Image (cartoon, helix red, strand yellow):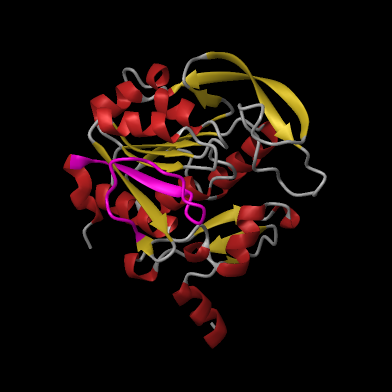
Amino acid sequence: MSIYSKLKKYLGFPQRSPDTDFVKISGEPTWNSPYFMMKLCHGQDQVTRELSNHGWKSFEKPMPHYFANIIQKLNNGLFIDVGANTGFYSLLALSVSKKIRIEAYEPVIEIFHILKKNIDKNGYRKRALIFPYAISDKSGDGYLYIPDNSHGLIETSASLSSNFKESIMEHRSIKKYSLDELYCNSQPVNIIKIDAEGHDLEVLTGAQNIIKRDRPIIFIEVLLGSNEEEMTNIIKNNSYKDYVLFQDGLSRPNNSIIHETLAWNHILIPEEKIGILDN
């Protein structure tokens, strides 16, 4: 291996696999975690392209670091990935922990098929279930609003919220479910990641029984226009703290959720589990 290749591996930068349509992504060296691969889609997958150019530690910094660290500490149980896209966080979880199980939801059928290929390529089907459904506050039929995709890239902003994007190319009928209905008799849910493009409050609202029962750690996106008051009520009523993921690290624990212009990603942690952030 060349010095350049060794340096890329040490820094966590991805390497091309022999299959030129996949990127080989190394984990954090100090965890000695195995690599995983993601499909490039000939450069159309914005997430994989970002990983290819800069490495996973720079993607949505510092969320992957905290996410992988928490997954490794828990090292078992069930991770629910809402808005999985092509599967970066699901693959990261599966590579960091040999025991974690994931159930991932991606309602855009074209992206769902890429997610399936990424899971299959890495041999994770025994620990991963994936579904082409949307997650909301209640189960039933709904519409998925697809923005204009004339940019030629894989569209990452489809939403159940009709006003999330100004320019809508099409809307599709979709089955939607609440997490409480899906997991009313499941094994304990340890971690939930919510990236629902403006529909995050509804996902959180539909998971309150799980929150009370299992006390999961929740990674959630808080965008401009989010209903901060309702989100705050949920964490207060369930004795959770909010941590904002700034590029240089975590905020202090907060009792309320506020949108931050430069830091959309938050961690919601039950008060009794705050110690998981130590070290």
Q: Is residue 2 visible?
A: no
Classify residue 147 as left or right of residue 38: right
Residue 213 within the magenta-colored segment of the rendering: no
Residue 257 within the magenta-colored segment of the rendering: yes
Image spot of residue 107 (x, y percent): 61, 30
Residue at x-position 69% and y-position 36%: 165
Image spot of residue 175 (x, y percent): 59, 18
Q: Is residue 134 visible?
A: yes
Image spot of residue 252 (x, y percent): 28, 55
Residue at x-position 58% and y-position 62%: 51
Residue at x-position 51% and y-position 26%: 135
Picture quarter with the C terminus: bottom left
Image spot of residue 98 (x, y percent): 34, 49
Classify residue 172 as left or right of residue 203: right
Residue at the top extreme of this rendering: 140
Rendering quarter of residue 64: bottom left
Q: Is residue 143 above or below residue 8?
A: above
Span shown in magenta? 250-271
